[in-house]
Image: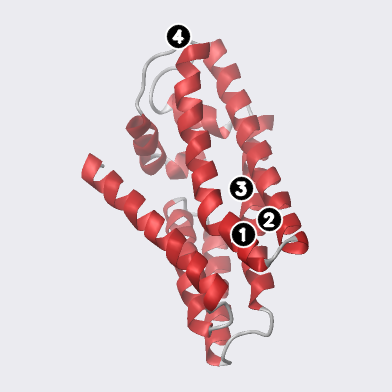
Amino acid sequence: MSVQHVVLTLLGAAAYAGGSHWLMVHAANSPWAVVVLLGPLLTMAAGFAWRARQWHTVAGVAAAFAALAAVVARGGVDDVNKLYVLQHAGLHAALGITFAVTLRQPLSIIGKLASRVHALTPDMVRYTRNVTLCWVAYFFCMAALSVATYALAPFSAWSLLANVLTPIALGSLFVGEYLLRYRLHPEFDRTTLMDAVRAWRANTPSVRR
C-alpha cells in the first residue's frame, strides 16, 4: 500500500464520517440513509469474513443485507436511531470480546500480528498482551459511552461521537501506541505503521484462526 493509497483512504474515511454525521442529523429516517450508513460497514465485514473463511460470519452478514433490503422496501423503520446505536455499540462490544478471547492464548491478537513482522522476545510478548488489553478496554468503554450518550444527550451529540470522535479516538490510540512503544522499549525492533497494516492485510485468516 503506497502513501497515496493511505492518503486517499484517510480522505475517504473523513468524507464518510462527515457525510454519516450529516445524514444521521438531517435524514436519519430515510431508508436510503440506512443503506449509505450501514451498507459500507456490512460490505467491509463481509470482505474480512470471506478472507478469514469465517463462513458463519458471512452467512450472518448476508442475513443483515437481506434485513437492510427489507428496511428499504418498507420505507424505513419507526425509530432508526436505535438501529444506529445498536450497530455502533454492538460492533465495539463484539471487537472487545474478540480481542479479549485471545488473551487466554499464548499470543494475543496483537502478538500474532506482531509475530508476522518480526520474531518476538518474551518482553515483546508481554507488551503485545498489554496492548491487546488496552484495545479491549477501549472497545468496551466506547460501547458503554455510545449507549450512555444516546440515553442522556441529544441524538446530534451521539452522531458526533459515532461518526467523528470515534475514528479520531481510534486513530489517536493507534498512533499513540506506536509513538509510546519505542519510548518505553527502545530495544524493540523498529517497524513502521505500514508494516502493521501489511501484516493485518496479508495474514487476516491466520490471525483469526
Work out whether mark 1 precedes mark 2 in sequence or the reverse, and give the earlier one.
1
Q: Is residue 2 visible?
A: no
Report how far apart the C-alphas of labels 2 and 4 lie in the structure.
36 Å
Report how far apart the C-alphas of labels 4 and 3 lie in the structure.
30 Å
Residue under the point 77% across and 62% down: 151
- Disc 2 residue type (three-letter): Ser
Q: Quadrant of the C terminus?
A: top right
Give the image location of residue 46, x and y in percent.
47, 62
Residue named by callout 3 = 95
Work out whether mark 1 precedes mark 4 in sequence or the reverse, and give the earlier one.
1
Relative to 186, residue 200 above or below: below
Which label lies toward us, 3 or 1? 1
Residue 29 vs residue 41, the one in the foreground: 29
**What's the coloring here?**
secondary structure
Report how far apart the C-alphas of labels 3 and 2 lie in the structure.
14 Å
Q: Residue furthest top?
A: 187
Residue named by callout 1 = 88
Residue under the point 64% across and 84% down: 77
- Disc 4 residue type (three-letter): Pro
Residue under the point 69% across and 71% down: 82
Residue named by callout 2 = 146
Residue named by callout 4 = 186
When asked about the image quadrant of residue 153, the answer is bottom right
Q: Is residue 148 visible?
A: yes
- Disc 3 residue type (three-letter): Leu
